[in-house]
Image (cartoon, coloured by chain):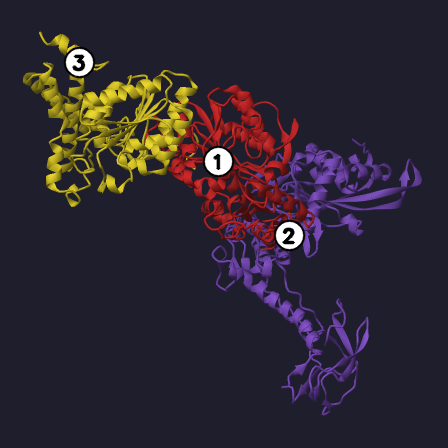
Chain colours: A yellow, B red, C purple
Amino acid sequence: MKSEPKVRASLPEGLTPERLLEMYYYMVLTRTCDDRGFALNRQGKIPFAATCQGHEAIQVGAAFALRRGVDWLVPYYRDTCMALSFGVTPREQLMCLFARKGDIFSSGRQFPNHYSVPDRQIASISSIIAAHVTHAVGIALSIKMRKQPAVVLTSFGEGSTSEGEWHEALNFAGIHKVPIIFLCENNEYAISVHQSLQMGVKNVADRAAGYGFPGVICDGTDPVQSYETVRDAVERARSGGGPTLVEAKCYRAMSHTSDDNQLTYRTQDEIEAVKTRDPIPRFENWLKERGMLDDDTIAELKAKALRDVNDATDWAEAQEPPGERDLYTHVYGSGPLS
Amino acid sequence: MATKNLLEAVRETLHDAMASDERVFIMGEDVGARGNVFLITAGFQEEFGRERIIDTPLAEASIIGVAIGAAMAGLRPIAEIQFADFIYPAFNQIVGEAAKTRYRSAGGNTCPLVIRTPYGGGVRGALSHSVSIEALFYHVPGLRVLAPSTPADAKGLLTSAIADEDPVLFLEHKRTYRLIKGEVPEGRYTVPIGKADIARAGKDLSVITYGLMRHFAVEAAEKIAAEGIDAEVVDLRSIRPMDRETIVASATKTRRVLVVHEDNKFGGVGAEISAAIAEEALFELDAPIKRLCGPDVPAMGYAKEYEEAFMPSPDRIADAMRELARF
Amino acid sequence: MPQLGETVTEGTVGRWLKKVGDQVEKYEPLLEVETDKVASEIPSPFAGTLTSILAQEGTTVPVGAPICEIGGAAGGGSSTGSGTATSAAASPATAQAASGASQASSPGSSAGLVSTSGNGVRYSPAVRKLAREHRVDLGAVSGTGRGGRVTAHDVTAHVGSGAAAAERYSPSVQVASAAILPPRALAAHAPSPMPVAPAGDEDTVIRLSQMRKTIAERMVLSTSTIPHAWCMMEADVTDLSRWRDKEKAAFKAREGVNLTYLPIVVSTVCRAIREVPAVNSTWAGDHIIMRKHINVGIAIDVEDGLVVPVVRDADRFSLAGLAQAINELVDKARKRRLTMADLSDGTITVDNTGALGNVASVPIINPPQAAIITMEAVVKRPWVVNDAIAIRSIMNLCLCIDHRVLDGAAASRFLGSVKAQLESFQPG
């Protein structure tokens, strides 16, 4: 095609048309999964759902900046797109929504989206905000001690950055220059509390200076910019340059979870306004402009996503739930319960 | 066999673990250049390097949190909390994170972490250097809580703790560091987690205890033996898991039980011991289960009088034994 | 009565210095008191009128007891001596009363575990369990615990005195005896309505302890159901006696226990049983059970009666071992610490009646055993040895057997073996 060389020349380091299409697909897949989760919740089939609508770009960009099978991911409970882009399958995602015994994250013990797949280097997390950030630092420390060519990416919302442990984690990481990327997905709301009530600074990234390493900001609704920013931070970490605090500005389109009703603290107008920043249609346009995507392909990919999610839903729903005896497993590796 | 005090036994065990397993590393406040405030790790940083003996910032939650991450990634961290009184900021990391790692990932992730900390009174440590914390933590499924009282047990149990695949809270009674000496076998050996020790066999009454109180109880038992009272002393060594079998067997044999612990009485470990005996050996008991424990006040004060009033002594234990024998 | 010295517990009223009706000033001398340490003038603690004298001259009263009353000006009240001495004197007595009361009530303060029987007495779970298992009437058990509480040890000791054993054994033995005894014997076993003149003023009534009751029941049981046959032999133990005299100091030093004739006889009894195993048997109604293990019961006198604890597998012990084992049982018996295990499964009893000076006894068999042997006092007698008169040490041996199980021949063979062993005793 006539425009190819121009397209290739303007693509960021590490991205190809193929990879960009993959990124787009994962965003669509995630949206489909998220919609399915809410649908199941409204049908009464699952008690709880949380979406990452508004976060897809930063999450897919970050995942693609990492090396699968080498680097570690320590995500938080809104990182569905990051998880799906880093090797979690739709079936595994739906299994955890249905809390089936075969759920690979926790055998139905945790809330949805509490990812844990150690053999794909996704660490286990709890529901306690920011508790995982020190763990991520510990993993990074172990990588440094073993001199492995790996990095750790840990993500969290802006509310997490108020927790004392979050600060302790960054402090430690800055002292020991461990190979880590602290990614803040700032959607401005910690449930109902706006950022202006969460911190005295305008940007979370401003805090990095207090810990001795760079803090950078990117547009979290732009997957390419997100990718570039995280890629740079990954390179710094991998080459021994230490931590980076990346703040991705994005938005939260839906309520915090299916148990929240954001109309109690946000206006409908505000919500409609942020939805115009939806990263998926914007990325579609970006790709179309560069001749990497057309409407047929869009339809094809959306249909594929729907097929995959339908298959995952039906399969997961049919799986066995845990039984009473499953209560007692995996308390200890061996020995009595008490 | 050499005679060592408890501190030397711990030091030797840590050194051997560091030397034999490169996954093991130690992190905590002042563990490196200072070698720990009791000199337990003196010289370790020079020998093993700053990467494996890490002086952490003054931030207990992250000492444990970072150690958890390292353990999840396959290393064997030994995290130190300088005094048990300082452990509270790390409570969530221990109870909400470390203890749950295996359970919440259905075995996918594990946390082979050892947390060491000195506890207990008798050194004029006042309100914030003398508390006992075992009651707060032994309640938690997924966590192991150990409290050896002899140098030989300290070495064997610490070795077991480091090898264990689950998080272990290893409590060292600071008064026993230098006060208690004993024979410690050479070479590597383990003491099984979850097994109590019969410190003194007897038939007239059973004292169930742990920590510094084990030694006071044995001393009291020797004293009253001359009065014709033959007391058995059971040293739990392991608070969770607890050796219910040995406790119940002793209670069944002697029919009279005295629980002794330094920690506050209400809700202390003695409550669980008493409940277990009542559940499994009620019809063997010839007297109500007696507890001699620390008073239900926040902590022992700085004045010598406060400390002495707080901590059970061999004489007070002997009095309690006599009373029980005469019931 | 004031306390006129730290260790003084009573005082004797000497001379009253005031009479009833006299006015008394505070601190005025009231009387003279003598104790075994000191004689003093006691000043009055009050001013007033001496209204009555409660302790006459020459009487001895305990410290704290009231000795006179003073009424009037100072508000009256009885005087027991000087003010402070009174309260000090009063406190030991009242403290004793108080501690007595608190002792009695302390079982009440230990809630929950100790259960009540109908009469308000409380028993611990262990006590009730043991009582149930051994069919003990707890009302008949005296308690050594605090405030007179019946302890688990008290119950096992009570069982040890044979009471519960009798209850345990009696049903099966009664069945057996019903099968073979004529009605007359059965009637003898039943409580006898024999009339007894009531105790007179000069007579002493002795209440039956549980041990006494039990011994009585067992003796009646034994003599009414077991046909006893008795025989006796004389053993020349001169050589044994000389050996013992030589050995006893070294034995004591080495083993820590005395070398008496008892372990020696027990060891010969064990060997004799090997020769005549039928002696180690029991009558079981329609068959005889010959026991494998030789568990020798040792009759031991205790304060209120008799117990027969058992040395199990006595044939496995060396002489020193036997001496130790017997010593331990005696010690336990005297301290009332025998357990059920100590008192069970005896197969033959040895009774050292000689220790009391007997030269012949007709012992009563301990059911369900089939024999009991006594060893009588060692007495120097003129004896015929090789057709000449010599002075020899003679120990009589008496044996009673259950004639259902054993006949005279077996009895004599057995007793003869014991005699022969004692006469040719070789140490080791």
The residue type indicated by label 3 comes to Ser
Dot 2: within a 10 Å radius of its alpha carbon, few (fewer than 14), some, or many (20 or more) residues? some
From this view, report whether residue A180 is shown above or below residue B171.
above
Residue plotted at (29% across, 39% down): A199
What separation in Å lies between label 1 and label 2 (alpha carbons)?
A: 78 Å
Asked whether B91 or C119 is in front, the reply is B91
Residue C223's mark?
A: 2
Of the pair B64 and C270, the residue shown nearer to us: B64
Q: In this view of the protein, can residue B204 be seen by the observer?
A: yes
Report whether residue A319 is seen: no
A326 on left or right of B6: left
Chain letter for mark 2:
C
The image shows residue B42 at horizontal and vertical percentages of 57, 28
Quarter assignment of residue C149: bottom right
Mark 3: which secondary structure? Answer: loop
Mark number for residue B81?
1
